């Protein structure tokens, strides 16, 4: 009978319930960090236990204090020994800046994988991809995992330096400055060049402004919501 239990037992029961409700955490160790000139960096994290995920899945990465966490898309292949993240450093950002400064060997806690955005999925054999900045991450994971290759794929960054060191075997756009590696302008430019067809699915990942603009273009062309897949990393007003 619960009414006969002592206050200390009741307290420990409540605590156990709280612990049971907390999402499980997985431990990984920072094996390598690659910093790219434009503010992106890539982390390779060795999990302590096998870690299965689908291309496009995210993990919650716990920051330096308490339960503070941020979602990050896995950018590596599902068959790789290490997990990879592609992150834009936000100076002063509580998690991205902390991750940027972590020493190799550091222990990091992450959540189990989760997600609803899965480029490269076999169910949709005709795909067109749009990414801005670190929004390339889920697409890189799909490419490295051997998923469906897109008919077209555009990746847009702010500065030419962002393109360095990251393999993107499709169209690249640089919105500020000039680049010999990419076209000038935004991924939303020259939309008439984008393939359409009744079976084409569109995958959009990155900044909300890009996602909204591409969605509007697609709506004008009569593409239904069921063929537009979105993952918003950043809100323009937060920048
Ligand atoms: C589903 C999902 C997946 C994501 N995957 C990735 C990923 O793979 N790679 C990645 O880099 N990010 C990803 N993000 C974004 C990431 O979760 C964080 O929001 C981001 O790293 C900022 O967190 P922070 O703790 O460093 O900054 P915070 O401490 O939350 O913010 C610090 C300050 O920076 C401002 N700020 C926030 N975002 C920006 C920005 N883009 N530019 C300038 N200032 C900003 C805030 O308004 C605040 O003033 C994802 C987000 C979602 C929702």
Image (tube, grey):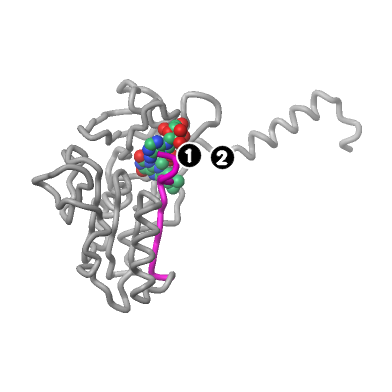
Which residue sits at x=18%, y=37%?
Answer: 161
Whereabouts is ligand 1, in terms of quadrant?
top left
Circle on res. 48: none
Which residue sits at x=27%, y=64%?
Answer: 128
Looking at the picture, how far across and down is residue 194, in whole percent?
23, 68
Which is more toward the observer, 221 or 177?
177
Secondary structure category for the residue under label 2 = loop
Looking at the picture, how far across and down is residue 56, in whole percent?
36, 52
Q: Which residue is mark 2?
A: 23
Q: Quadrant of the C terminus?
A: top left
Earlier sequence position, callout 2 versus callout 1? 2
Q: Is residue 45 above or below residue 228?
A: above
How crowded is the residue under tag 1: few (<14 C-alpha within 10 Å), some, or many (20+)? Answer: some
- Residue 170 visible somewhere in the drawing: yes
Looking at the picture, how far across and down is residue 47, in whole percent?
37, 35
Secondary structure category for the residue under label 1 = loop
- Tell whether label 1 touches label 2 (CB within 8 Å): yes
Q: Which residues are magenta?
A: 226-239
Which is more toward the observer, 44 or 140?
140
Q: Residue 93 lies in magenta, yes or no?
A: no
Q: Residue 228 lies in magenta, yes or no?
A: yes
Circle on res. 111: 1
């Amino acid at each position: 009978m619960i009414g006969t239990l002592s206050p200390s037992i009741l307290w420990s029961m409540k605590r156990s319930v709280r612990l049971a409700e907390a999402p499980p955490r997985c431990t990984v160790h920072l094996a390598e960090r690659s910093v790219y000139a434009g503010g992106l960096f890539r982390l390779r994290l060795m999990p302590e236990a096998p870690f299965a995920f689908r291309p496009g899945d995210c993990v919650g990465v716990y920051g330096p204090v308490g339960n503070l966490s941020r979602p990050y898309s896995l950018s590596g292949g599902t068959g790789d020994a290490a997990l990879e993240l592609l992150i834009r450093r936000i100076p002063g950002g509580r998690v991205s800046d902390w991750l940027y400064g972590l020493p190799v060997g550091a222990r990091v806690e992450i959540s189990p994988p989760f997600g609803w955005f899965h480029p490269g999925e076999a169910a949709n054999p005709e795909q067109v991809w749009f990414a801005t900045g670190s929004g390339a991450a889920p697409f890189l994971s799909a490419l490295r995992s051997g998923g469906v290759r897109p008919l077209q794929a555009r990746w847009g960054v702010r500065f030419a330096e962002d393109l360095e060191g990251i393999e993107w075997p499709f169209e690249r756009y640089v919105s500020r400055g000039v680049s010999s590696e990419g076209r000038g302008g935004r991924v939303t430019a020259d939309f008439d060049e984008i393939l359409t067809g009744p079976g084409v699915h569109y995958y959009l990942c990155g900044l909300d402004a890009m996602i909204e603009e591409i969605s509007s273009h697609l709506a004008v062309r009569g593409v239904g919501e069921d063929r537009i897949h979105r993952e918003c990393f950043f809100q323009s007003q937060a920048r």
